[in-house]
Image (cartoon, coloured by chain):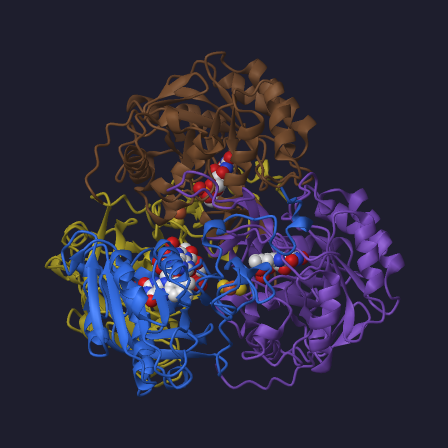
Chain colours: A yellow, B brown, C purple, D blue
C-alpha cells in the first residue's frame, strides 16, 4: 500500500529556552488557558508545534518537562490550554499572572499545509482542539475552507469552539450530549470526510487512530499530532517513540518530539504502539524474530 | 549571581586526552549531540559522550520507556541506536565537521562485540576516546551485568584496550549495584582501563497504581537524576580514596555547578551531566559556568587543584 | 478525596503475629513511639518499630548528623540510644501500658551481641517480634556490614532465632548495597528468618560546598526517603519473585497510600513509613487510610489479596 | 561547679499539625514577617517555642521541615520572621497572602519564667530578637523590668526593635554601625548583665555562647534558645542533638527540638558542639575513651 502522506518536514526555526511571565490566565471549562509573554517563541511558532515547561519551580521534585501544545501565537504572546491531570499539569494550571515559568519552544514539526484552497477537516478531542486554532487560521489565509469537529466527554471538556467557529463551520460532539450532538467525533467525521482534501487531528490516541483510519479508508491524507509520554521534548532521551512507517516503507521507532508530534495518519502504526513488532528496524537485535 | 573573576583554568583531560572543559554530556542523555546545538556551544564543552552504540542497529524497547520518580526518573530505552555503521556514517562526521569532541560509548553482550566496536573506532576523526558501558542494566541479556562481576568486567576492558586505538583512552563505566565498587574499579584498571566513569543508573522499579503492573515493559529500569547523587558521590569518593591516580569521570544527578563541585572535590577530574539535560537543555554549558564561578569564589586557580580536595 | 467504601480487611501479620494494620513506623524514624502520640493513634497502627537498640547506652555520633538531599536525606545518627536496659525499663513498658505493639529492632557489632539482645527480649510484654538490623551502615565497626555478606548475615540470624522467644517472629533487615539481594535473602531465610525487612538506607555521601569536606563526620551516611523508593521496590519485587512464601516488611520512601500500594503489589505484606514521618508526623496513620481507600477503589476486599498482585 | 539553671520544663500543651493560611505578609529589612491564621497553634503557644513548616508545596523535593521561632501568638494568629537563606526559607519568605502552608506547633520547651519581678535582660541576634517579643510581654506582665539588646550585622538585619521597645528599654548594636551602637551585643551585655536577675538569649550559636558565658561569669542564670539543624522538629529523628549537662551533672546528647530549644546557658557545652566528648553518656560504646 502506498502512503497518502509524506513525513512532516522540520520547522523553519530552532527552539529557544526562556523564562517567561504569565500575562493572563483564564479558566475555560475544565481547563486553564495561560497566555505567556514569550515574543521569541511566538515569532518562531508554526501550527502544530508545542512547548515544554519545567514544573514545580525551584524546589521541584519533578525533573521532566511537560509538553503542551501551542494554542495560539502572536503579538509576542503564546497561548496554551492546560488540563490539570497529575502534579505537573496541576502546577501549571495553578500559575498566577506575573509568575515566571521556564519554557522551551517551539518544538516539534508543524502540520504540513496542503495545496492552496484544499478544503480541510480539523478534528480536535478535548483540549486538543486548541492546538488546531492556529492551523485553521493559516489554512483560511491560504484559501481553504475549514470545517472543524470538536469533541469531548462533556461540555466542560470542550475547548476553542468559538475560536474555530470564527474561522469556519464547527460541529460539536459530546459523549454525554451535554453540548452539541451526542456521540463521538468519528460520527461527525464520517459525514464530513468525503468532502475534504485533507484531515488534521489532535487529541487522545484512540481518537487519532479512529480518525486516521476513517481518512485513510476514504483515500484522504491525514495528519495527526500524537501525545506520547515525553521526558525531554527536544529529542535527546528516546522515551517518546512510536512505530512509524518511513518513506522507504520500513517502520522505525520515531521520536514523537522531534520527528513528530505531527505524523501522517497512515504512517503511525497505532495498533502496535507500546509493543515491539518484529519488522521495526533493529528489532532483530533485540531478539525479536519474524513470525 | 555576583560578578566573580572566573579566570580559572578549566582545562582537564580524559586520561591523556586534553579537553578545555571538565563538563561533558552523559551517554544516552544527549543523543549524539546535534539536538543540543540550539542550546549549547558544543565545541566549548568537554565532549559529547555519545549514546552507547552496539554493532547492529537496535530498535530499543517498546514504550513506556520511562517513569518519573521523586527527583529522578526510571528509564528502559534498551539502547535504541543506528549501530556502529550508522554512527560512523552520520553522527561522528557531523560532530567532527563542527570540531566537537566525541567520547564514544560502546556496548555489547559479548566480549568480542566490545572489541570489534573498539576496532571499528580506531583512528576515527574527532573520537577522543571510548567509554565502555559494561553496566547498562537495560540490555536484553539480563543475567548478570558485566559490571557486577569483576572478572567479566575485566575481560571486556582488556579486550577493548587491546583492540582500541592506542591514542584513545578507554574509560570503564561502572555500575553502583555492587557490594564492592572499589573491587570492580581495581579489577578494570588492572585490566587496562585508563579511567573510570561513575556511575551508571541504579536498578529500580515503579508499579503503575492503575494497571497494577510494573510501568516499564522490561519490569525494572535504570534510576537516574538528583535522587541518586549521594550514591554517585559516595562511589567516586571511595574509588578515588582507594585509587587516587585513576582519572574519574563523575556523574549521577549533577544539575548545578555546586553539584559538579562536589564530584570534583570527591575526586572526579571531569563530570557528565545526564538527566538534568531533560530538565534544562542548556545544563551542560550552565554547569560549566557555575563550576568555574564556584572554583573562583573558593580561590582555586585551576580545576586541577580542586580534584580530590575533600580528601585532604 | 472521593468517598469510597473502605471496608477493606486491612489485617495482616508479621510472620505469625497478627496486626490490625499493615502500616508500621520504620526503625530510627519514630524514636520509640511516644513523640508521635499527639499526631497518631499508636494502638491503631501495625506496630511501632523501635529504634535499633544495642547492649550498652550509646551517645551516637557528633553533629552534623544529616544532610537534606533531593527528595531524601542522608543520616548518620550512629544508633544513639539508651541500651537494652533503658529500653526494657522505660520505653517498652510505656508502649505496653498503652497497648501499643512493639516490633523491636536490635543491632550489634558481634553475633553474640545480637543473641544476647534477643535473649533479653524473651517474653517481654508487648513485644510482637524482632527486626534484626544487620544492615545499618552507620555503626562504628565499618569493615563489611553483616548484611553485605550472606554468611555473616546468616550467622547473626541463626543466633538470634535460636536465642529469641519462639513466640516472637524474627525479621532480618536487608541492605540494598549488595550485588545480589536475592542471595542474601535466601541465606538469611535458610538461617531461620521468619520474614524480611527491606530496605535499609543506601550508602551515600554529601560534600559541603563551603567547608569542602563531607558534611557528615562519619564521611558517608544512609540515604533514605522517596528518592530511593524505586530501588526499594525493585528489591521487594526481586525477593518476592524468588521467595514468594517469605513475608516482607517493605520500606524505602513510602509517603502516600499509593506508594504503600506499590510495595504491597510487589510482594510486601506490611510496610514501614520512615523518613516521610519527618515531613508529616501523621504520615503513618494517613498512609493506612489512603492505602485502605486505594485497595477499596481497586476492588480488593482485603489487603492480603493484593500482596504480590503485580506478579500475576 | 553547680548549675545556675534548672532544665526548662516541657510546654503545657501538645503540638498540633494544621494546614493554615497566610493572613498577612510584610517585608522587614532583610526579613519577611508572616502572620498565619492558626488559632489552635496560637492558643497553645508559650514564649520560646517554635513551629515547623513543610516547604515547597505539593511538588517539593525538600522533605525536611523548617523550624522557625514563634515571634508572636494571639488573636488566633501566629507570627514568624523568616530570613531567606536556602531553598526552604526562601520559599517560606515568598509565600503570599492566602497561600496555604502545612505547619506543626507549638514545638519545644518555652523559656522558664523567673520569680515575679526579677529584672530580665533579653538578648536577640538578627531575627532571633523576634522570638523574644512574647517573652518580654510575659515578663512585663509578671512585674519584671525588661531590658533588651538587639544586635545584627547591619540595620536591615535587626528585627522587632519597636516591639521590644514598647515593653522596655532597648539597646541596639550593629557590626557596621548602620544602626545603634557599633559593635557586638556582648559589648552592651557587659554593661547590663550586672543589673539583672536573669538573661535570655536567642540568635546565632556564637552569640548564645558569648552571652551565656557573660551571664554565668556574672553569676546570673541564663536561658538560650539554640538553633541546631533539625530534620523533624518533633523529637523522632535524633539529628538535632548537642551536649547538654543534666541535673545529675552528666552530659548527654540532648535533642534541641524536644529537650530544647531552650536550655540553661550554663548547661550547653558550646565548645563541644559538633564533637563527641568522651564524657558524654554512651560515648564509651562509640569507642571514645577517657583521655
Ligand atoms: C505534544 C504534546 C502536546 C500536549 N498538549 C497538551 C495540551 O495542550 N494541554 C494539556 O493539558 N496537556 C497536553 N499534553 C499532555 C501533557 O503533557 C500531560 O498531561 C502532562 O505532561 C502530564 O503531566 P503531569 O505531571 O500532570 O502528570 P503525570 O502523569 O504525573 O506525569 C508523569 C510523567 O509522564 C509524562 N506524561 C504523562 N502523561 C502524558 C501525556 N499525556 N503526554 C506526554 N507526557 C505525559 C509527564 O510529562 C511526566 O513526565 C500534551 C502532550 C504532548 C506530548
Ligand atoms: C528552633 C529554631 C528556630 C529558628 N527560628 C528561625 C526564625 O525565626 N527565622 C528564621 O529565618 N530562621 C529560623 N531558624 C533557622 C531556619 O530553620 C533555617 O534557616 C532553615 O531551616 C534553613 O532552611 P533552608 O532550606 O533555607 O536552608 P538549607 O541550608 O538548604 O537547609 C537544609 C537543611 O538544613 C536545615 N537547616 C539549615 N540551617 C538550619 C538552621 N539554622 N537551623 C535549623 N535547621 C537548619 C534545614 O532545616 C534543612 O533541613 C530557626 C531554627 C531553629 C532550629
Ligand atoms: C534516558 C537515559 C538513557 C541512558 N542511556 C545510557 C546509555 O546508552 N549508555 C550509558 O552508559 N548510560 C546511559 N544512561 C546513564 C547515564 O549516562 C548516567 O550514567 C546516569 O543517568 C546517571 O547520571 P544522571 O543522573 O546525570 O543522569 C542513560 C540514562 C538515561 C536517563
Ligand atoms: C534518621 C534515620 C535513622 C534511622 N535509624 C535506623 C535504625 O536505627 N535502625 C534501622 O534498622 N534502620 C534505621 N533507619 C532506616 C529506616 O528504618 C529505613 O529502613 C530507611 O530509612 C528507608 O525507609 P524510608 O525511606 O521510609 O525512611 C534510619 C533512617 C533514618 C532516616
Ligand atoms: S521526549 Fe525526549 S526524545 Fe522525545
Ligand atoms: S529535629 Fe528530629 S529529633 Fe530533633
Q: Nearer the viewer, residue C290 or A281?
A: C290
- The picture places residue B83, in percent across and down from the top left corner, at 49, 30
Q: Residue furthest left?
A: A75
Q: Is residue D153 above or below residue B222?
A: below
> Where A90 sits versus B27, above or below?
below
The residue positioned 57% from the left and 73% from the top of the image is C35
Instruction: Note whether residue C270 is visible.
Output: yes
Residue C308 percent across, percent down from the top left: 70, 64
Q: Nearer the viewer, residue A228 or B1?
A: B1
Q: Quadrant of residue B188?
A: top right
Q: Note whether C17 is above or below A120 in the view shown.
A: below
D163 to B189, vertically: above or below: below
Q: Nearer the viewer, residue D105 or A93?
A: D105
The answer to whether one can see residue A48 in this image is no
Residue projecting furthest to the top: B166
- Picture residue at 89% right of the left edge, 66% below the top: C166
Q: Residue at x 23, y 79 (%)?
A: D167
Q: Position of residue C179 (x, y in %)?
A: 68, 41
Q: Is residue D57 left or right of residue C216?
A: left
Write down which quadrant ligand 2 falls in. Answer: bottom left
- Badge count: 0
Classify the position of the C terminus of chain A by image quarter: top right
Q: Position of residue D179 (x, y in %)?
A: 14, 59
Q: Is residue C209 left or right of residue A36?
A: right
In the rendered image, which quarter is residue A13 located in? Answer: top left
Amino acid at each position: 500500500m502506498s502512503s497518502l502522506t509524506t513525513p512532516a518536514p522540520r520547522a523553519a526555526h530552532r527552539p529557544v529556552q526562556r523564562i517567561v511571565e504569565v500575562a493572563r490566565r483564564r479558566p475555560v471549562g475544565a481547563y486553564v488557558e495561560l497566555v505567556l509573554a514569550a515574543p521569541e517563541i511566538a515569532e518562531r511558532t508554526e501550527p502544530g508545534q508545542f512547548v515544554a515547561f519545567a514544573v514545580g519551580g525551584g524546589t521541584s521534585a519533578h525533573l521532566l518537562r511537560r509538553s503542551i501544545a501551542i494554542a495560539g501565537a502572536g503579538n509576542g504572546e503564546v497561548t496554551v490550554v492546560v488540563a490539570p491531570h497529575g502534579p505537573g499539569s496541576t502546577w501549571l494550571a495553578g500559575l498566577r499572572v506575573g509568575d515566571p515559568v521556564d519554557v522551551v519552544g517551539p518544538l516539534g514539526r508543524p502540520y504540513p499545509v496542503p495545496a492552496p484552497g484544499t478544503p480541510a477537516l480539523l478534528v480536535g478531542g478535548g483540549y486538543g482542539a486548541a492546538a488546531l486554532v492556529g492551523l485553521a487560521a493559516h489554512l483560511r489565509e491560504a484559501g481553504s475552507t475549514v470545517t472543524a469537529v470538536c469533541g469531548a466527554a462533556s461540555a466542560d471538556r470542550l475547548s476553542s469552539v468559538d475560536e474555530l467557529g470564527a474561522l469556519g463551520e464547527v460541529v460539536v460532539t459530546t459523549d454525554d450530549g451535554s453540548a452539541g450532538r451526542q456521540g463521538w467525533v468519528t460520527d461527525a467525521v464520517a459525514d464530513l470526510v468525503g468532502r475534504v482534501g485533507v484531515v488534521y487531528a489532535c487529541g487522545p490516541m484512540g481518537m487519532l487512530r479512529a480518525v486516521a483510519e476513517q481518512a485513510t479508508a476514504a483515500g484522504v491524507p491525514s495528519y495527526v499530532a500524537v501525545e506520547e509520554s515525553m521526558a525531554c521534548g527536544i529529542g535527546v532521551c528516546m522515551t517518546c517513540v512510536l512505530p512509524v512507517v518511513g518513506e522507504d516503507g520500513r517502520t522505525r521507532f520515531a521520536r514523537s518530539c522531534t520527528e513528530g508530534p505531527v505524523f501522517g495518519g497512515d504512517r503511525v502504526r497505532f495498533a502496535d504502539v507500546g509493543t515491539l513488532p518484529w519488522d521495526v528496524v533493529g528489532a532483530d537485535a533485540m531478539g525479536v524474530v519474524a513470525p | 549571581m555576583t560578578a566573580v573573576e572566573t579566570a580559572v583554568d578549566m582545562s582537564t583531560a580524559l586520561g591523556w586526552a586534553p579537553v578545555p572543559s571538565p563538563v561533558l554530556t552523559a551517554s544516552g542523555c544527549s543523543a549524539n549531540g546535534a539536538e543540543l546545538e540550539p542550546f549549547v556551544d558544543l565545541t566549548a564543552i568537554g565532549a559529547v559522550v555519545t549514546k552507547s552504540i552496539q554493532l547492529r542497529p537496535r530498535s530499543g524497547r517498546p514504550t513506556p520507556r520511562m517513569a518519573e520518580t521523586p527527583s529522578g526518573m526510571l528509564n528502559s530505552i534498551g539502547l535504541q541506536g543506528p549501530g556502529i555503521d550508522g554512527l560512523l556514517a552520520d553522527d561522528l562526521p557531523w560532530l567532527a565537521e563542527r570540531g566537537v569532541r566525541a567520547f564514544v560509548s560502546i556496548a555489547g553482550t559479548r566480549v568480542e562485540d566490545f572489541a570489534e566496536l573498539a576496532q571499528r573506532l580506531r583512528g576515527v576523526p574527532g573520537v577522543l576516546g571510548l567509554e565502555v558501558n559494561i553496566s547498562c542494566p537495560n540490555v536484553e541479556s539480563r543475567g548478570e551485568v558485566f559490571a557486577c562481576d569483576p572478572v567479566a568486567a575485566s575481560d571486556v576492558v582488556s579486550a577493548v584496550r587491546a583492540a582500541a586505538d592506542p591514542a584513545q583512552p578507554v574509560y570503564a563505566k561502572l555500575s553502583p549495584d555492587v557490594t564492592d565498587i572499589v573491587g570492580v574499579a581495581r579489577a578494570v584498571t588492572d585490566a587496562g582501563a585508563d579511567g573510570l566513569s561513575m556511575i551508571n543508573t541504579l536498578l529500580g522499579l515503579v508499579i503503575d497504581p492503575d494497571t497494577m503492573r510494573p510501568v516499564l515493559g522490561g519490569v525494572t529500569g535504570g534510576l537516574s537524576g538528583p535522587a541518586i547523587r549521594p550514591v554517585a558521590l559516595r562511589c567516586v569518593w571511595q574509588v578515588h580514596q582507594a585509587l587516587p591516580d585513576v582519572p574519574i569521570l563523575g556523574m549521577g544527578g549533577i544539575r548545578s555547578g555546586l553539584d559538579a563541585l562536589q564530584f570534583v572535590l570527591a575526586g572526579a577530574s571531569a563530570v557528565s551531566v545526564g538527566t538534568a539535560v531533560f530538565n534544562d537543555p542548556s545544563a551542560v554549558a550552565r554547569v560549566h559556568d557555575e563550576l568555574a564561578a564556584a572554583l573562583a569564589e573558593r580561590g582555586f586557580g585551576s580545576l586541577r587543584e580542586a580534584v580530590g580536595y575533600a580528601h585532604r
